[in-house]
Amino acid sequence: MSFSLFLSRRRGAMRTAGVCLFLVTLLCLPQVPSSQAAPVGGGWTRAAGVHAAEHFVGQYKNSRGLAAYCTDFERLSPENAGGYEDGHSGGFIRSDGSALNPTENAALSYLLHRWGDTADNATAASVQLAVWALTSPGMAWDSSGMDAILRAERLPDGVVAEARSMTKVAFSEAGPYEVDIRLEAAGAEGTMTASVSVLGADGTSAAGLAAGAELSGPFALAEERGATWTTADEPHRLTLKRTGLGGGSLTVSVPRTPAAGVQWLLPSRDGVQRLLAAAVVEPRDSAAAIADLPAFQPTVVTRASAARTGVGTTVHDVLTVGSSPAAGGPAGTAPWLSLPGNGTPVSVEVVSTLWGPLPSRPVLQESPPSDTPMVGSVTTRVNGPGTYNTPGLVVPSPGWYVWTESISPESTLPAEASRYVLAWQGKYGITDETTFVPWTPDITTELSTHDSLVGERVTDTVIGSGFGQPSIETGAVVTLSMYGPLPERPSLTADVPADAPLHSKVEVPALNGSQSSESFAAFTAPGCYTVVASYAGDDHTNAFTSAFGEPSETVCVGEDEPAQPPTPDATVAPALPASDEVGQAPARAELAQTGIPAKVASGAALVMLGVGLACLHAGNRSRRTAGESAHR
């Protein structure tokens, strides 16, 4: 008779109710009071469980220690079986002929596998309630049949709540299973972490399953007894320590995972409950390859020791060494390669090359142009991230200089690690790697004369050298400043005296080579005058100032001699014609060059003067004779 008869409201007759009550007393739990260890037919004994108001709710064990739970709640209890024959295995079929679906079978199997062997009374009672809810017709949770039993038995609330929780967990963590292994990035001292989970059909971590790990290759587990564990709701973490170069694998095995099926025993008599003995189990495993050490990419960021310096100074490069993931590798900062086992970092050589001098600032590009002049190369061995200074090189002349760096795997120490090091080459023309050596001009000058007279003008011959092309292109000028009049020829000094008067200035282009200046202003007073040449400097050329009182730049000016008045007997000489040159000072009284020697010319003049005086005397005498005759 089914349990539904017991619950039927259509039959109100007392006789039917009495029959049902009688049947309830014949269920899985004993009809007469008995101890928990009371024997059951076929060598089975009641084990862990709870004696409820009317029935024993728990597990049974045989002489071999096999635990089992009653099913088919509406049938008679195991005490009525007399014994149990060999069981069956597979998907379970309820007493009404309905088969459990794969999900229900998997949940039932998980329930028995995880909690079936418990020795705790309350846990065993919870398992029994969950088994009835899954296998007995009309006994699902929240059904009228289950509610009636719970009211009649008055089980502890904790037992019922745990039974409900077990059922829920069994469905969420049931198989089929997958072993999930996730290897995380390597940490300090060559270690890495493996996160291992056994996932059920819905991706939830399944707890309560025995698992083990095995390593191959140059690796070892850092944890003691870490090779075996029982799965939990959270992933199990393993720390793998690399002991050498090379790759390997991590294999995780779960030898007994509950499959979608159970084992049950058949009673020797009809109408008696079957016993669910165990879950059907099957192995699950998975392997994850542990890659060899990744390719290591050392990197260098550099900065020249000086952005600007002078000819003949020593410059060096400041290296900031680091590492980065290889192309296609994971993002983020990559650790510097160290030898597994002892943690010794590998070392590589950074070759730094100084290019120059260059006529203009270098342009950023992947590599130097083929015709780029080179000062030299220096080598710096580095063994990890940090800042290093290279040996120095002397910059020989003005211009721009720029560093480039390179790393070759062949320079790796120890040599066996070279296959893990990638080559590196820096770009050419990086601003921070550039040093500029300014041009230093040299200017020499020579005045057109060093003796002059008031009212005259002079010019300057300027010879420039050492000007850089940028200075020439900007139209820079050299300023020529004339100081005077000075009371005497100046002494050579580096600076212009504070009381030296400025006479005038002229400018010439700042060029390499010789050129002539315009005339300074005319001299207005006697004395000495001297010129100072100066260049203000610019971004590419240093300033220049010549000394004060350079002999080549000094002229002394005298007064022009005044014209002599004629003697009384002298004949006034005709005036010389004025100069045709505009702005020229009056010519001094000198004899014109006619081709006649000066002494001859002087003698001729004296002869002519004597003749003139004789004629004048004769004339005067004739006039006196004529007067006297007239007077007579």
Image (cartoon, grey):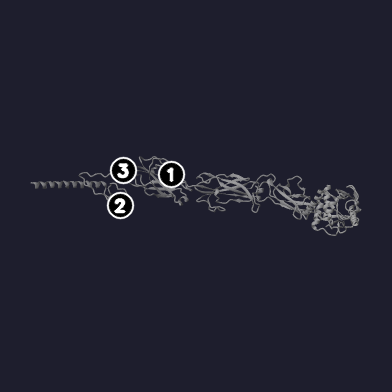
Q: Amino acid at mark 2?
A: Asp
Residue at the extreme bottom of the image, as rendered: 97
Distance Cα–Cα, label 1 vs label 3: 31 Å
Image quarter of the N terminus = bottom right
Task: For label 3, count other residues whose C-alpha is less than 10 Å away and answer few (under 14), some (14-19) or many (20+).
Answer: few
Picture disc at residue 580: 2
Task: Kindly indicate the quadrant of the structure image that contains residue 525.
Answer: top left
Picture disc at residue 454: none
Task: For label 1, count other residues whose C-alpha is less than 10 Å away and answer few (under 14), some (14-19) or many (20+).
Answer: some
Viewer-proximal residue, 175 or 471? Answer: 175
Viewer-proximal residue, 148 or 490? Answer: 148
Task: For label 2, count other residues whose C-alpha is less than 10 Å away and answer few (under 14), some (14-19) or many (20+).
Answer: few
Q: Is residue 474 left or right of residue 486?
A: right
Provide residue 527's location: percent of width, then percent of height: 34, 42
Q: Which residue is mark 1?
A: 545
Distance Cα–Cα, label 3 vs label 2: 23 Å
